[in-house]
Image: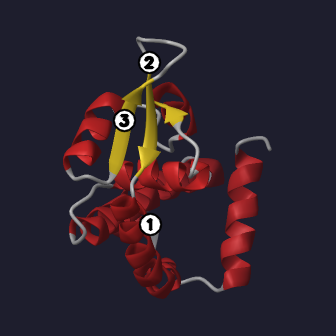
């Protein structure tokens, strides 16, 4: 369904306004799809993002501040998210030897195992959810980068 039909707005000021509204609407639509997907694994989008960051850092530790700087959602409460991941035994946190106020974070084997399971399922669903070919997805990514001035 076209954006005009989805939000029941037949006209836009211009093509740029339509593109921005479509982008925001689609981002929220994807967020809802991801929320449903990750719920089956007992985690949220933001928790998955942290696990993904920690896997990329593995086996090295990383600070909470560095995690926050790499997150997709910069408004996330990283401390709260880390505490929830610790409770699920997906990450470990230890005091930073250089700064007693800071903590070092590392993904656990359970966290890595969960990501392996999620990766297999995501590989099967990413293209179906996006309904784009690989070439179209690459083109979309390039256009989104361009819109951010990159």
Mark 2 lies on residue: 102
The image shows residue 145 at horizontal and vertical percentages of 73, 51
Q: Earlier in the sequence, mark 3 or mark 2?
A: 3
- How packed is label 1: few (under 14 Cα within 10 Å), some, or many (20 or more)? some
Q: Is residue 15 above or below residue 104?
A: below
Q: Earlier in the sequence, mark 1 or mark 2?
A: 1
The CA distance from mark 1 to mark 3 is 44 Å
Q: Quadrant of the N terminus?
A: bottom left
| Quadrant in the picture for residue 138 | bottom right
Under tag 2, what secondary structure? loop
Q: Is residue 99 visible?
A: yes
| Quadrant in the picture for residue 122 | bottom left
Residue found at the very far top of the displayed protein: 100
* Residue lying at 41% horizontally and 11% vertically, measured from the top left: 101
- How packed is label 2: few (under 14 Cα within 10 Å), some, or many (20 or more)? some
The image shows residue 50 at horizontal and vertical percentages of 43, 47
The CA distance from mark 1 to mark 2 is 45 Å
Q: Is residue 119 above or below residue 100?
A: below
Residue 3's disc is 1
Mark 3 lies on residue: 93
Name the front one of labels 1 and 3. 3
Name the front one of labels 1 and 2. 2
**44 relative to 142 in the view: left or right:** left
Asked whether the residues under the numbered discs 1 and 2 touch, taking CB atoms below 8 Å apart as contact, a structural biologist would say no
Residue nearest the viewer, comparing 14 with 19: 19
């Amino acid at each position: 369904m076209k954006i005009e039909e989805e939000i029941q707005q037949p006209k836009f000021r211009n093509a740029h306004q339509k593109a921005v509204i479509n982008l925001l609407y689609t981002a929220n639509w994807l967020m809802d799809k991801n929320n449903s997907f990750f719920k089956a694994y007992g985690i949220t989008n933001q928790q998955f993002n942290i696990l993904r960051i920690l896997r990329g850092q593995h086996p090295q530790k990383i600070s909470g501040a560095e995690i926050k700087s790499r997150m997709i959602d910069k408004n996330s409460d990283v401390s709260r998210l880390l505490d929830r991941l610790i409770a699920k035994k997906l990450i470990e946190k230890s005091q930073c030897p250089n700064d007693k106020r800071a903590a070092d974070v590392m993904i656990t084997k359970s966290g890595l195992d969960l990501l392996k399971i999620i990766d297999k399922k995501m590989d099967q669903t990413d293209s179906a959810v996006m309904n784009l070919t690989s070439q179209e997805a690459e083109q979309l990514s390039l256009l989104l980068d361009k819109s951010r001035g990159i």
